[in-house]
Image (tube, rainbow, N blue to C red):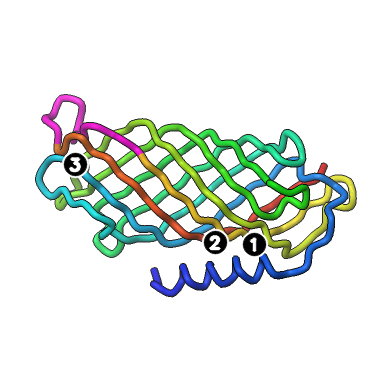
Amino acid sequence: MSSARPFVAAAVMLLAFNMPTQAQDTPVRGWGVLGMGSGSANIRCDGAGCTSDWNLHGPTLLIGVAVMLNHHVGAGVVVDNWWRDPADSEATSTGTFMLHYYPSVRQHAFVEAGAGLSLAEVRLDGGRHADGRGLGLMAAAGYDLHLLGSLDSREAIEVTLTPRVSYVYSSIGHLRYDASSPPFATRWRHEVLALGLGVGFRGGW
């Protein structure tokens, strides 16, 4: 994952905020987004090989869907994935039920917050892996930049480019090879700060 990619995404976000926009006559009713980016993780735990500080880096994958309840508030599900690169030895996946909020009726800039299930996995030599799960918390902010389509007609679809920055925190507890084995690590907590760029699909039906 190129270290320049986060800066490209940030530049796109700045461009989006400075582009002229028009009032949106048809409200967004639902949307989905698929994106990739780069993230840094801070993992703390007790056990062999545990590290701390924001010194683990790797790619991220984002998948999300939501239904808008009104012009400003939506509810949905989002999955944030991160894995270490190039060692590919640690990975996290956090799926949250979230609230999505557009401060403006133009529905471009947004913030999100959610809670759900977070998974952590450590892959070891020889194909063994230790994993665990616990409560995950997510917060994010982003911007929907219009690319294609229009919501001015019934059942129309709009395609957007969506820069997004996110933060995920989870306290997992024990990581084990299996249910009967001693813990590989205890008091596992991870944080992931990610910057990504996604392609979104919004409907105004």
Give the residue number, with chain letter if any, for mark 3: 45
Q: Is residue 178 magenta?
A: yes
Image quarter hosting the C terminus: top right
- In this picture, residue 24 sits left or right of residue 37: right
- Which residue is depicted at the point 61% across and 69% down? 14
Q: Which residue is mark 2?
A: 197
Q: Label 2, label 3: how many angstroms apart (C-alpha)?
A: 30 Å
Looking at marks 1 and 2 on the same chain, the residue that comes earlier in the sequence is marked by 1
Question: Badge 1 is on which residue?
Answer: 161
Please name the amino acid that badge 1 sits on.
Leu
Kindly identify the amino acid type of the residue bearing the numbered disc 3. Cys
Crowding at label 2, few (<14), some or many (≥20) Cα neighbours within 10 Å?
many
> In the figure, 75 relative to 124: above or below?
above
Q: Secondary structure at mark 2?
A: strand
Q: Please name the residue shown 67% across and 37% down the image.
A: 74
Q: Where does the image place residue 158, in percent across and percent down from the top left?
A: 76, 55
Q: Nearer the viewer, residue 167 or 150?
A: 167
Label 3, label 1: how far apart the Cα atoms are: 37 Å
State yes or no: discs 1 and 2 in contact (Cβ < 8 Å).
yes
Q: Residue at image x 30%, y 41%?
A: 120
Front residue of 179 and 147: 147
Q: Secondary structure beneath disc 3?
A: strand
Task: State the SS at label 1.
Answer: strand
